[in-house]
Amino acid sequence: MKCMFCGFMNSKVIDSRINDEGTSIRRRRECEKCGKRFTTYETVETIPVLVVKNSGNRQAFDINKIKAGIIKACEKRPVPMYRIEKLAQEIEKQIYNTLDQEVTSKYIGELVMEGLKELDDVAYVRFASVHRQFKDITDLLHEVEKIVDKK
């Protein structure tokens, strides 16, 4: 590994630790020439996934957008952040497990709604109203009735 301070090509690993989720390894290194220490991270390289929007546009998959949508839906609801993080990670895992290089935003939205159903009914309805683009109050009422009937 190239030293970021002097550019020398050899360094030795002093310490290695796996992160909490087990998705990367943090390595503490020391340059064999200048003796300075630096940190590197090793992660699994993933196949880039593109999201096909309703308009037909494509953009790179971004887990942060999913998290932001879930957080918005759960605003002022008793849903802890660790549950939101866990849901986002589960959705990301499902998307990468499809092995497709393109997924639709509709598919992602359905995965989010499935997860929100388990977390919080109000958050689910909030997200569904945006994702399914409810036209009027009857669409909202119909969705709420489905939830009440299941309980």
Image (tube, rainbow, N blue to C red):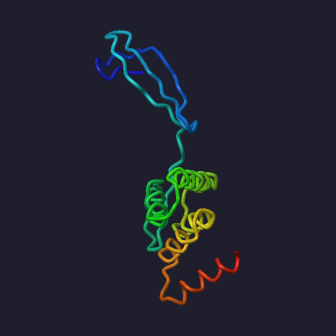
Residue 18 vs 62, above or below: the answer is above
Q: Quadrant of the N terminus?
A: top left
In the rendered structure, the answer to whether residue 29 lies left or right of residue 141 reads left
Judged from this view, the residue extending furthest toward the front is 78
Residue 101 in which image quadrant: bottom right
Q: Nearer the viewer, residue 80 or 17?
A: 80
Q: Nearer the viewer, residue 46 or 115?
A: 115
Residue 122 vs 27, above or below: the answer is below
Residue at the spot 47% in from the left edge and 75% down from the top edge: 130
Q: Nearer the viewer, residue 150 or 12?
A: 150
Image position, residue 41 (x, y; %): 46, 31
Judged from this view, the residue extending furthest toward the right is 150
Residue 136 vs 1, above or below: the answer is below
Residue at the spot 59% in from the left edge and 62% down from the top edge: 119
Residue at the spot 52% in from the left edge and 30% down from the top edge: 25
Marker count (numbered): 0
Residue 115 in which image quadrant: bottom right
Image position, residue 40 (x, y; %): 43, 27
Q: Quadrant of the C terminus?
A: bottom right
Image position, residue 140 (x, y; %): 53, 83
Q: Nearer the viewer, residue 9 or 37?
A: 37
Judged from this view, the residue extending furthest toward the left is 6
Residue 121 in which image quadrant: bottom right
Image position, residue 150 (x, y; %): 70, 76
Residue at the spot 33% in from the left edge and 15% down from the top edge: 36
